[in-house]
Image (spheres, helix red, strand yellow):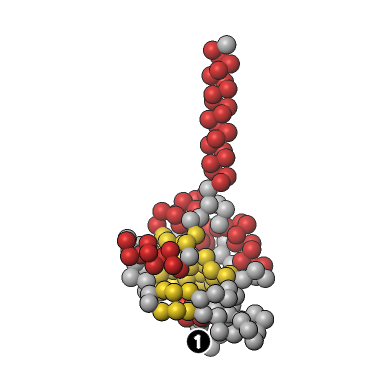
């Protein structure tokens, strides 16, 4: 009987650990939450701009952002923001209101924030776009491509 209790306890403990690992996710913040977090404790920031129609964005969600080592590194070292570039609502950040001015006239209009942070002179806006900022919210690196788990981990 005692042996059975020990086996059941170990089985339960292992099951809970497996479920905890499977349910671990990146702590994505909104820009509003980011502003509050930065006011309390400055930290590096990673911003993932995506669109629902972007195949490589979806692949990163499935293949890259589910890796435990990536989840742990992002959650530990960064504030992570994920934003749909086509969102229609206004965002208040750093005392400024950012909007998607073209959503009434264009089907795939891009919000002002991704245009501000993820545009490159001489290139059209493209996705996926991943932006890394330092503790002072200064852009340090921009990537406009699918990043494999290995490449993202080395970048982090």
Frontmost residue, 110 versus 14:
110
Task: Report whether residue 144 is seen.
Answer: no
Seen at 49% across and 50% down, the residue is: 69
Q: What element carries label 1?
A: loop
Residue 30, x across and y down, in percent: 48, 65
Q: Is residue 151 above or below residue 126?
A: above
Residue 34, x across and y down, in percent: 42, 65
Seen at 37% across and 62% down, the residue is: 37
How many marks the image carries: the answer is 1
- Residue 22 falls in image quadrant: top right
Left or right for 59, reference 89: right
Seen at 55% across and 32% down, the residue is: 14
Q: Quadrant of the C terminus?
A: bottom left
Residue farthest along the top direction in this orientation: 1
Residue 98, x across and y down, in percent: 48, 79
Seen at 40% across and 69% down, the residue is: 133
- Residue 141 falls in image quadrant: bottom left
Q: In this view, does 55 lie above or below 90?
A: above
* Crowd class of label 1 (few under 14; some 14 to 19; many from 20; radius 10 Å): few
Q: Mark 1 points at which residue?
A: 121
Left or right for 65, reference 79: right
Frontmost residue, 8 versus 132:
8
Q: In this view, does 61 lie above or below 111?
A: above
- Residue 125 falls in image quadrant: bottom right
Q: In which quarter of the image is the N terminus?
A: top right
Task: Report whether residue 17 is seen.
Answer: yes
């Amino acid at each position: 009987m005692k042996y059975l209790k020990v086996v059941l306890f170990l089985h339960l403990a292992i099951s809970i650990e497996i479920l905890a690992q499977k349910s671990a996710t990146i702590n994505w913040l909104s820009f509003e939450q980011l502003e509050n977090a930065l006011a309390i404790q400055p930290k590096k920031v990673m911003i993932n701009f995506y669109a629902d129609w972007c195949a490589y964005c979806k692949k990163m969600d499935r293949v890259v952002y589910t890796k435990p080592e990536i989840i742990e590194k992002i959650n530990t070292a960064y504030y992570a923001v994920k934003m749909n570039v086509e969102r229609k609502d206004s965002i208040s950040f750093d005392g400024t209101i950012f909007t998607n001015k073209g959503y009434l006239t264009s089907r795939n209009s891009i919000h002002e924030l991704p245009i501000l942070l993820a545009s490159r002179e001489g290139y059209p806006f493209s996705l996926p776009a991943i932006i890394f900022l330092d503790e002072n919210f200064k852009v340090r690196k921009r990537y406009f491509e699918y990043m494999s788990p290995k490449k993202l981990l080395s970048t982090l």
